[in-house]
Image (cartoon, rainbow, N blue to C red):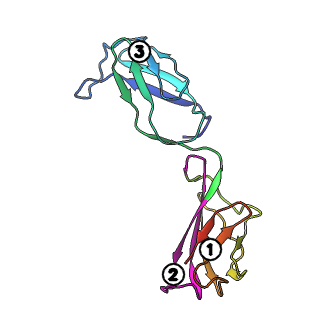
């Protein structure tokens, strides 16, 4: 589900066995949970409406409350995808060594929205995105292109300037990812 994209919502009245209660009729039902609340009118056990999400969210549930009798229900959880907000990074060593004399591994970068959703529609090579380390010996100097919001880059740092720890900095405002 995308931010600010109109969505259809169908609410069904069901009994404890999951059967549709076609005789249920109410115009007192409120659509809740940070959405533009509004009244739903049921006919034959169902009500339909359209809504938009004004913010990105992870595992968001829509609450529907019948104000005439206090009955309520929640939707399945939804992830609402927003616009690019920040990079998250992680590093996994592949050289099967310890210490920081020489480091090889895989740098994973994820483009996320402000709710922490990975942006699967994000592809390409954003400029100016570079990789750097304290000693300036990281190879390659740019991350691999993003595919479905994720960039996986094999990197090596030949001579870290600090023998006890090293990190990779991504671009001017990206994360600093510890590697050893």
Q: Residue at x 53, y 85 (%)?
A: 99
Residue designated by label 2: 94
Residue range of the region highlighted in magenta in the rendering: 88-117
Q: Residue at x 57, y 84 (%)?
A: 100
Which percent across, then down, holds residue 4? 62, 34
Frontmost of labels 1 and 3 is 1
Q: Is residue 96 above or below residue 83?
A: below
173 and 80: which one is in front? Answer: 173
Q: Helix, strand or loop at disc 3?
A: loop
Residue 147 position (above or below residue 30): below
- Under circle 1, the secondary element is strand
Label 2: which secondary element: loop
- Location of residue 73 by image quarter: top left
Q: Position of residue 88 (x, y in %)?
A: 59, 60
Q: Which residue is mark 1?
A: 167
Q: Residue at x 51, y 81 (%)?
A: 94
Mark 3 and mark 2 lie on one chain; the one further toward the N terminus is 3
Residue 2 is a magenta residue: no
Q: Which residue is mark 3?
A: 42
Residue 118 in picture, x, y percent from top left: 56, 53
Whether residues under marks 1 and 3 lie with C-beta atoms below 8 angstroms apart, the answer is no
Image quadrant occupied by the N terminus: top right
Could you tell which of marks 2 and 1 lies nearer the N-terminus? 2
Q: Position of residue 145 (x, y in %)?
A: 66, 66
Nearest to the eye among marks 3 and 2: give it.
2
Q: Is residue 103 magenta?
A: yes
């Amino acid at each position: 589900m995308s931010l600010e994209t109109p969505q259809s919502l169908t609410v069904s009245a069901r009994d404890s066995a999951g059967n549709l209660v076609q005789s249920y009729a109410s115009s007192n039902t409120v659509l809740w949970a940070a959405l533009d609340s509004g009244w739903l009118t049921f006919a034959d056990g169902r009500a339909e409406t359209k809504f938009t999400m004004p913010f990105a969210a992870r595992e968001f549930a829509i609450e529907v409350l019948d104000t005439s009798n206090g009955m309520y229900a929640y939707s399945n959880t939804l992830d609402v995808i927003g616009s690019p907000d920040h990079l998250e990074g992680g590093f996994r060593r592949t050289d099967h060594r310890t210490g920081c004399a020489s480091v090889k591994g895989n740098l994973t970068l994820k483009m996320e929205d402000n709710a922490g959703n990975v942006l699967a529609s994000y592809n390409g090579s954003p400029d100016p995105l570079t990789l750097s380390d304290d000693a300036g010996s990281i190879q390659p100097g740019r991350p691999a292109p993003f595919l479905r919001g994720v960039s996986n880059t094999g990197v090596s740092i030949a001579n870290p300037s600090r023998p006890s720890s090293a990190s990779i900095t991504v671009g001017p405002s990206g994360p600093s990812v510890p590697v050893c």
